[in-house]
Amino acid sequence: MSENLKADLIAKAREEGFAAVGITRPDAVPEIAQRLAAFVARGWHGDMAWMAERMAWRGDPSALWPAARSVIMLAEPYTPQEDPMAVVGMPERGAISVYARNRDYHDIVKKRLKRVGRWLIERAGPDTTRAANSGNSPAGLTAEPPRIKVFVDTAPVMEKPLAAAAGLGWQGKHTNLLSRELGNWFFLGAIFTTLDLAPDVPGEDHCGTCTACLDACPTNAFPAPGQLDARRCISYLTIEHKGPVDEALRPHLGNRIYGCDDCLAACPWNKFAREAQEARYAARDDLAAPRLAELAGLDDATFRTRFSGSPIKRIGRGRFLRNVAYAIGNSGEKSLAEAVRPLACDPDEVLSDAARWALSRLSK
C-alpha cells in the first residue's frame, strides 16, 4: 500500500466522521480463539448462545472470509456532552447508556463504512497482486477489482482485539478499547478487503496500575483485569438477558434501564476524548433522563413509536419495562408505586414479576 493511498484513506475516513484508522491482518490475533473458548467454557457469555455457535468465525477472522487479506479498523467518537453519571443519582429518572440516547449507531456507522469502502475500491483500482497469486491468466496479471465487506458489531467479528492489533489503542482492564487520543467513548467499525495493505504497529497497554474501571463496576463483573463475566454485567443484564434478573443483583442495577457506562466513565484517559461530530449521537431530550413513571405507562405501540430508530427498540417493551420496574423498586420513591402497579398484572411473566418485586420493595 503506497503512503499516498494510506494518507488518502485516512483523509477520506476523517471526512466521513471517523477519528482514527488502522490496518491489520485477519490472522493478526491468533490468541483470541483460545480466550473466547475459555470465556464460553466458564459460562461467562450467559444467554448469548450465538457466541458459542459461531466461535469458529469469531475466534478466527481469517475463517470468516478467507479471501480477505487486510482488515481496516475505524473509530468514531460518541463522547457525551454532559456528565454520563449525573442521571444515576436521580431516583425518579432512568439512566440510559450514552450510546443509546439517540439514533442507532449501527445504521450510521455502517453507511459510512460502505462509503469509505466504495471509495477505496475506486481509488485502489484493480488488484494485480491478487490476480498474480491466483494465476488466472497465462501472464498471471489479469487485473481483478478489489472486494470489501463491512461489519459493525453485528457479525461474528472480534472488533476490539482487531482494533488493538491495528494500532487504534489497547483493550483496557474493563475489556473495552482505550486510546490515548480518544479515551474510550467511540464505536468501532471494520472493513475487510481483498487488498493487501501494509499493517500498522499494534497498540501498547497504557493502563499501568490504574483500576478505576474495575472499582467503578456496581456488580463486580470483572473476575480479574481484562476478564468480564457477562452474567454480572449490567449492560448484559438489561439488554441481552431475557429472563428475570437474579434478585441478589437487582438492587445493584440502581436506575440503569438500558446499558451501563460506569466503567467507561471512570477511565482517566477520557480527558483526551474527542468531541462527537455526529449530531445524531447527542442525547435526545426525552432520553437523557426520562421519567420512570412515564416509561412504565408505555404500551407496545407507544414503546415502538418512542424508540423508533433507537437501539432500545430491539429488546422490546417487555424487557425494557422489566428494567424500568427494577429501577422503580430501587428508587425508594413510594409515589412511583402507582405507576408500576398495573404492570404486576401484565401477561409478560418476567415483567409482572419485576413489578411485584418493585411493589414489595416500595412497601417496606
Image (cartoon, rainbow, N blue to C red):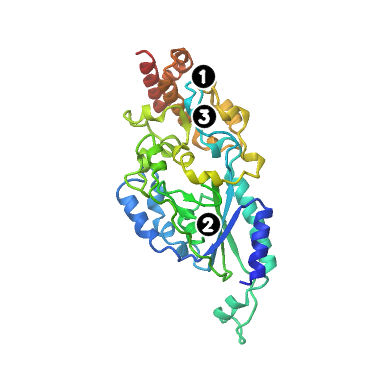
Give the mark nearest the N terminus, 2 or 3: 3
Q: Looking at the picture, which amino acid does disc 1 mark?
A: Ala
Whether the residues at callouts 2 and 3 have beta carbons within 8 Å, the answer is no
Give the mark nearest the N terminus, 1 or 3: 3
Tag on residue 293? Answer: 1
| Gap in angstroms between the C-alphas marked 2 and 1 | 42 Å
* Residue where numbered disc 2 is placed: 168
Q: Percent from the top left, x then y, of residue 264?
A: 47, 41
Q: Percent from the top left, x then y, of residue 332?
A: 41, 17
* Residue where numbered disc 3 is placed: 86
**Residue that appears at 64% across and 56% down:** 114
Q: Percent from the top left, x then y, of residue 267?
A: 47, 43
Q: Looking at the picture, which amino acid does disc 2 mark?
A: Leu
Q: Looking at the picture, which amino acid does disc 3 mark?
A: Ala
Residue 156 seen by the camera: no
Residue 76 seen by the camera: yes
Label 3 environment density (alpha carbons within 10 Å; few <14, some 14–19, many ≥20): few
Whether the residues at callouts 1 and 3 have beta carbons within 8 Å, the answer is no
Q: Percent from the top left, x then y, of residue 177?
A: 48, 51
Label 1 environment density (alpha carbons within 10 Å; few <14, some 14–19, many ≥20): many
